[in-house]
Image: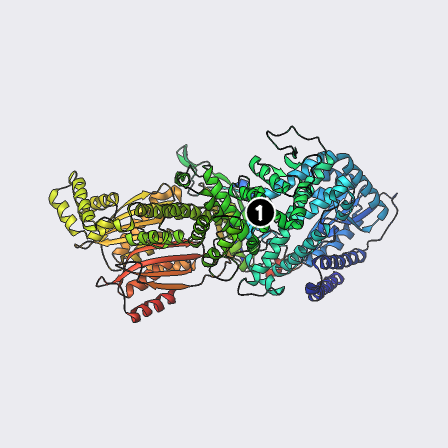
Amino acid sequence: MKKIEAIIKPFKLDEVKDAILKLGVSGITMSEVKGFGRQKGHKEIYRGAEYVVDFLPKIRIEVVVPAELAPQVVEAIKEKAYTGEIGDGKIFMIPIEKAVRIRTGEEDRDAI
Amino acid sequence: MKGSQKRVQVFLSEREALVAEGFSSETGLRFSHQYADLMDRFIRDLFLTAGFRQSNRPESDNALAVVALGGYGRQELCLGSDVDLMVIHRGDLSSEMAEIIRHALYPLWDAKLEVGYSILTFQECIRLAMTDFRMLTSLMDSRFFVGSRYFYRLYREAFWSRMAREKDSLLGKFLISRRERADRNKGEGCFVEPDLKEGLGGLRDIHLMSWMARIWFDCKRLGQMKRFAAFSHFEIRKLAASRSFLLKIRNHLHWLARRKEDSLRLPYQDQISKILGYEDKPRISGPEKLMRDVYLHLNRIRYRHEEFQVKMLDMIDPSPMESAQKDLPSEFAVLKGHIVLGEGVLSEMDPLVILRGLKEANERGLFLGSGFIWEGKKIISRKRKLLSRSDPGKALFLDLILKPQNPEIIRLALEIGLIGLFIPEFKKIRNLPQFGFYHVMTVDLHSLRTLDVINDITKGGYDEKWPVFKAVFEEIEFPDRLFLAALLHDIGKGYGEDHCIRGPQMIPKILSRLGFEKASVRAVSSLVRYHLLMPRVAQRRDLRDEKTCVQVAQAIQDRQLLKMLFLLSVADSFATGPMARSDWKIMLLAELFHKVQRILERGILATPDATQEIERKRVRIREMMLQDFEKKAVNHLIDQASSRYILNTSLQDMVAHFSLALNLGDRKHVWKLAKRKSASVTRIIQVTYDKPGLFSKMAGVLALNNMDILSASIFTLKNGLAFDTYEVTNPPDVYHETENWAKTQQDLRNALDERLSLDRLIKEKRDAKLPAPYGPQVRKKIVVNNEDSDFFTLIEIRSSARLGRLYDLACVIFSMDLDIRTAKVNSDGEKMTGVFYVRDSGGEKIYEPDVIEEARGRLMAVL
């Protein structure tokens, strides 16, 4: 099993979500986050301390899928979140050791 | 809980049994019905076990009904389809009842079904339907399941009476939804891997027809539309067969994918064709046969749907004839933008009227009315000879395909069998899929698209980027021949042999039947025979080598033919798919065209004396260099450069090389980068000290930095300097190009100093790559060729593409003491083709058979 975590531009969420669901993924977690990468927010000095302001609003989505489906999910996100502009985001793939569905106690593949 | 788990198990094993029994024997429609029945039993059982009691007391405050919606409601349930349920109730739902429903539904998730459910009041439900189109259509197919039947009937009446009141506003919603779906599904990818449900001609088109029939004509089944005169000839039965076929494929698709998957992707095409017994034949593979059927049914549904919609709109809103179009012959009229037969015109009296109608529609950018299309089909099937053998008939047909103004009308001519009537050979390529990396359409549609591209060229559609196309077109004396070749260039496909040989053999019969004279027949045959020559040479030969262009000139010989061939190659590439029409490839084609044209203009044998040409260029470069550099240094450097370098390099590149070399100083490596304008390609003009394996290092470093070499040429000077020119794809990150190039140059310098372990880095990068998506297999091939160049042995390679492939090949060639002097490479997604111009360490071509065999074997090993 793999977890795919992607940071994407907020307005791309619907497209990305639809593409992932189409691959047969049953659940997605999404959160609104702020951050910056190479796109960088600009720096400001306030009472002697340096602050980075302008964290940019992004969406983080997380899905857990069987390992063999992971490349397709990455491909789908890559295609749908693409604009070619700076700040399109990043995708991470992380190995998952175990998954348990709380209601039934099912594990791993049955639980995702 | 235990009881429900058992029920889930029973359901799953019954489903297995149903699949085992009915999958191959039943029609798609019947199988879906049977599966819906099984689902009904399962869910009803769950509700009863959960403590649900049937009640028919409508007056009770908590009357409720459980309803199946959407595909499940229609009993058109496929194995991975959503199981949509809705509970409609009045008043408040008791907590007891909510608990029962919860208990009844949970096992559905445990059975891994795609469940959708909602609990709504009567009013909520109708309100939602009016605001949400999907909800609306889903509710139209609702089916009573358990609960109060009487209450359900009340709800139905309320729903349909509301629908009747909203009829007019609904019409727009239906038309918009269809248009949006068409927009979503017109991409090229949607053709190779069609969506059986939402795609054009998919099951959704049939649902739309049924819904429209229900709302505006009160027909509970689509078949009842037959009672209207306008629909008396509507092919309901064929439509039902197509629907059943698609359902069958869809069920198999769901079963293989183990989920709701509606795109018929390539791996599934493969598997399903095997399951359904489509066998490979020499002329056509199993999957291709399956897809031929799929396209047939999708096309049928798509066109019947369009016909249905036009007829229906005519009935809903029979507006009067519009003001006549200018000069429209009186036998026609225009109705809602469509050409129809005028009052009192009978097609029986004069069958040519269909051809004249198409001509008018073609020229005016209109479409034909549905009744007219139907008449047309009737005429074509009944009066075949009368149409195809009459001279005016032929003339009208030719007028259509030689002046294809309106692609939709040409496509219509194909759909109603008109093209097949005049060119029966066309039937062989009808709906013929072509699996490969380049083609995204069936052969027939690709041919029409090629025709359309030529037409676009004539109208200046490519002027912005490639003004040369139109300029060349205007110099063509007989454009008709180009249009004919565009339509017929792939006519030889589907016979299991080379279509560039089969095609030209078929041309004389086709064209003489249509009344063309010998000169046209000859020209079109040649065009069809050579239509792949220019793209092949442009992509796989060194165009600086005079011999390459001379060989093409000898094959083509005629300047008119060359011009037509160039445009045909261009149109063919544009019509094929995104991979075939990359700017780089079009640029190479144009370069080859200009070079061959120059040779033909001055005569093949009249190539200028090479020694004079070299002397002229030497003088010129000396003059230019002396403006900035010392005389001694310049003269010295010119003496070092080989004649071959001077002959084969443009003056502009020479200036760049010389300036770099004269400014080299202590540095070991310098380069100058120049971006190409017409394609996303960068030229690297490079000067460095030659060292063994220079090309492989370059290939390795560029692969490491995500760039592909497209072409390379390497010249070594007597003093050991290497003057190279590379053309490579631009770095992927347009925002950090400078950094990217700086790092690449640093990597290269390290590699030249043996301080970069390319082998390891490339392996790491390759291992980290995600596995490639499924695609057709590439047949590996290596050809060693000593004929096409006077100075080099050509090694041609075809293989699947992977990171660093070029580096591997270059390392093998280098390890055999062979020297790569020119290379040309194409990586199109999954496929790589390339040619290396090599010679041995003594500067000779490779003639020894055992060396050639060894090279072949060792190269094969890394493919």
On screen, residue B702 versus residue B627, left or right, reads right
Residue B529 image offset from top left, x and y in percent: 43, 54
Judge by depth and name the residue closer to the eye, B369 or B160: B369
Q: Kindly tell me whether residue B704 is visible in this rendering.
A: no
Q: How many marks?
A: 1
Q: Position of residue A35 (x, y in %)?
A: 47, 42
- The residue at which mark 1 appears reads as A17
Residue B174's quadrant in the figure?
Answer: top right
Task: Say left or right for A58 vs B720.
Answer: right
Q: Which image quadrant for residue B823?
A: bottom left
Quarter of the image for the C terminus of chain B: give it: bottom left
Residue B554 vertical position relative to residue B795 in the rendered view, above or below = above
The amino acid beneath tag 1 is: Lys
**Whole-percent x and y of residue B713?**
28, 53
Q: Residue at x 41, y 32 (%)?
A: A47
Residue B158 or residue B176, whichever sits in front? B176
How has the structure been colored for display?
A: rainbow
> Is residue B827 visible to the viewer in this orientation of the structure?
yes
Identify the subunit bearing mark 1.
A
Residue situated in front as seen by the camera: B811 or B502: B502
